Image (spheres, rainbow, N blue to C red):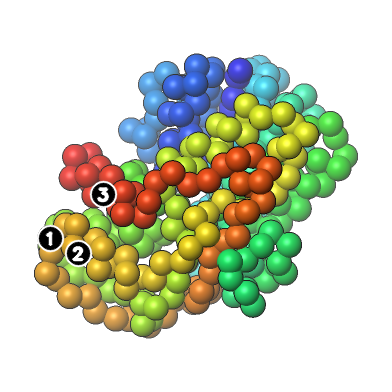
Amino acid sequence: MRVLVTGGAGFVGSHIVDRYVDMGYDVHIVDNLTSGKTSHINNKATLHEIDICSDSFGKLLTEIKPDAVNHHAAQASVKISVLDPKHDLLINGSGTANVALLSAMHGVKHLIYASSGGTLYGQPLKNPVHENAEIKPLSPYGVSKFAGEEYVKFVARSSEMNTTIFRYGNVFGPRQDPSGEAGVIAIFAGNLLTGKPCIIDGDGEQVKDYIYVSDIADINTLVLEEDSSKTNETFNIGTGTGTSVNTIYRTLREQIGSDITPSYGPPRIGDVRRIFLDCSFVKRQLGWQVKKTFSEGIENTIAALKNP
Ligand SMILES: NC(=O)c1ccc[n+]([C@@H]2O[C@H](COP(=O)([O-])OP(=O)(O)OC[C@H]3O[C@@H](n4cnc5c(N)ncnc54)[C@H](O)[C@@H]3O)[C@@H](O)[C@H]2O)c1
């Protein structure tokens, strides 16, 4: 099978690329390296340094004719989306429309789209939140990821292409940028390992669904191996349980053996207070469920930061 992974030089995409290479697939990557790194790229995959918003994306599809496109390229920062919503919408809305429309036009059989369960629902009335819950994002990022979903669904309605939408919880694991602002686990682990203090946004009792990246690679593989009658769907992908930032901090401090106490800052704009995902549909439909415990995921993340 030939698969094109957009964003394959990024945190999540690069783990999916590794898994696809292990499966024996012919793997191509489209990434413009805005936040991705060539050091993340598996040497058995081929990098095409192309912008998803460009016409070159279509030309590449004509050349390599992938069976599947797995779309993970994005402007993935909530903070940047608040500072520059126009840019965020260009990459996540317009860029996803380009990927979806061109994929259908060039005969791609299956499109997978990485959406965001952590931001789309805003502050849900009930947790765990089901796929059918109201969409009420609290950030431009949540809006642009949903715009991407709507384009993918529109293309699915008007073509033969099989489309799968994954609404991830908060993904964590090796290669998440500790100097960035996106992943609290990577940032705190990076700080504690180098003896730097950590600032917890708000009171630290905000709760999210943290999922280890190898479980994300698992579902992205399973979905390509399953029959299309089961995969033409939108799935929440998380653990089904919530963890607070204070618990993350305590777990990291214990595992690292640090005695640094955190300080508390103002709450983050556009942040959701309490969310975790109902993942019963993906379990029923595809038999997928998480394999890694939170503690095992934290252990692996710390080990990777110690030995980059
Ligand atoms: N990390 C999470 O917790 C999480 C949660 C929900 C959904 N997602 C989604 O998963 C995907 C991957 O997220 P990530 O955390 O790995 O982010 P990331 O920033 O590490 O990866 C995104 C990749 O896309 C590339 N990219 C950005 N703009 C591009 C463009 N215009 N053309 C080509 N490539 C471009 C970047 O260089 C990078 O390699 C994104 O779609 C994100 O919205 C992530």
Label 1: which residue?
257
Asked which quadrant contains residue 107, the reply is top right
Q: Are marks 2 and 3 in contact (CB under 8 Å)?
A: no
Q: Which residue is mark 3?
A: 299
Q: Which residue is at a point 66% across and 62% down the rendered structure image?
A: 130
Return the x and y of residue 124 as percentages of the image width and height: 62, 73
Measuring from the top left, give residue 135's x and y in whole percent.
70, 67
What is the CA distance from the residue labelled 3 to the residue labelled 1? 12 Å
**Do the CB atoms of the residues marked 1 and 2 lie less than 8 Å apart?**
yes
Q: Nearer the viewer, residue 213 or 120?
A: 213
Q: Farthest residue in the right direction? A: 158
Which element is circle 3 on?
Answer: helix
The foreground one among 201 and 49 is 201
Residue flagged by tag 1: what amino acid is it? Gly
Q: Which image quadrant: the C terminus?
A: top left
Q: Return the residue at label 2.
A: 253
Q: Quadrant of residue 43?
A: top left
Please tell me whether mark 1 sits on a helix, a strand or a loop: loop
Please give the name of the residue rendered at 59% of the width and 28% of the height, measured from the top-left corner: 4
Tell me if residue 57 can be seen. Answer: no
For the residues labelled 1 and 2, the Cα–Cα distance comes to 6 Å
Q: Earlier in the sequence, mark 3 or mark 1?
A: 1
| Whole-percent x, y for residue 217 in the image | 49, 37
Q: Position of residue 48 (x, y in %)?
A: 52, 27
The quadrant in which the N terminus is found is top right
The residue lying at 62 percent from left, 74 percent from top is: 126
- Tell me which amino acid carries mark 3: Glu
Q: Secondary structure at mark 2?
A: helix
Report the Cα–Cα distance between label 2 and label 3: 11 Å
Q: Amino acid at mark 2?
A: Arg
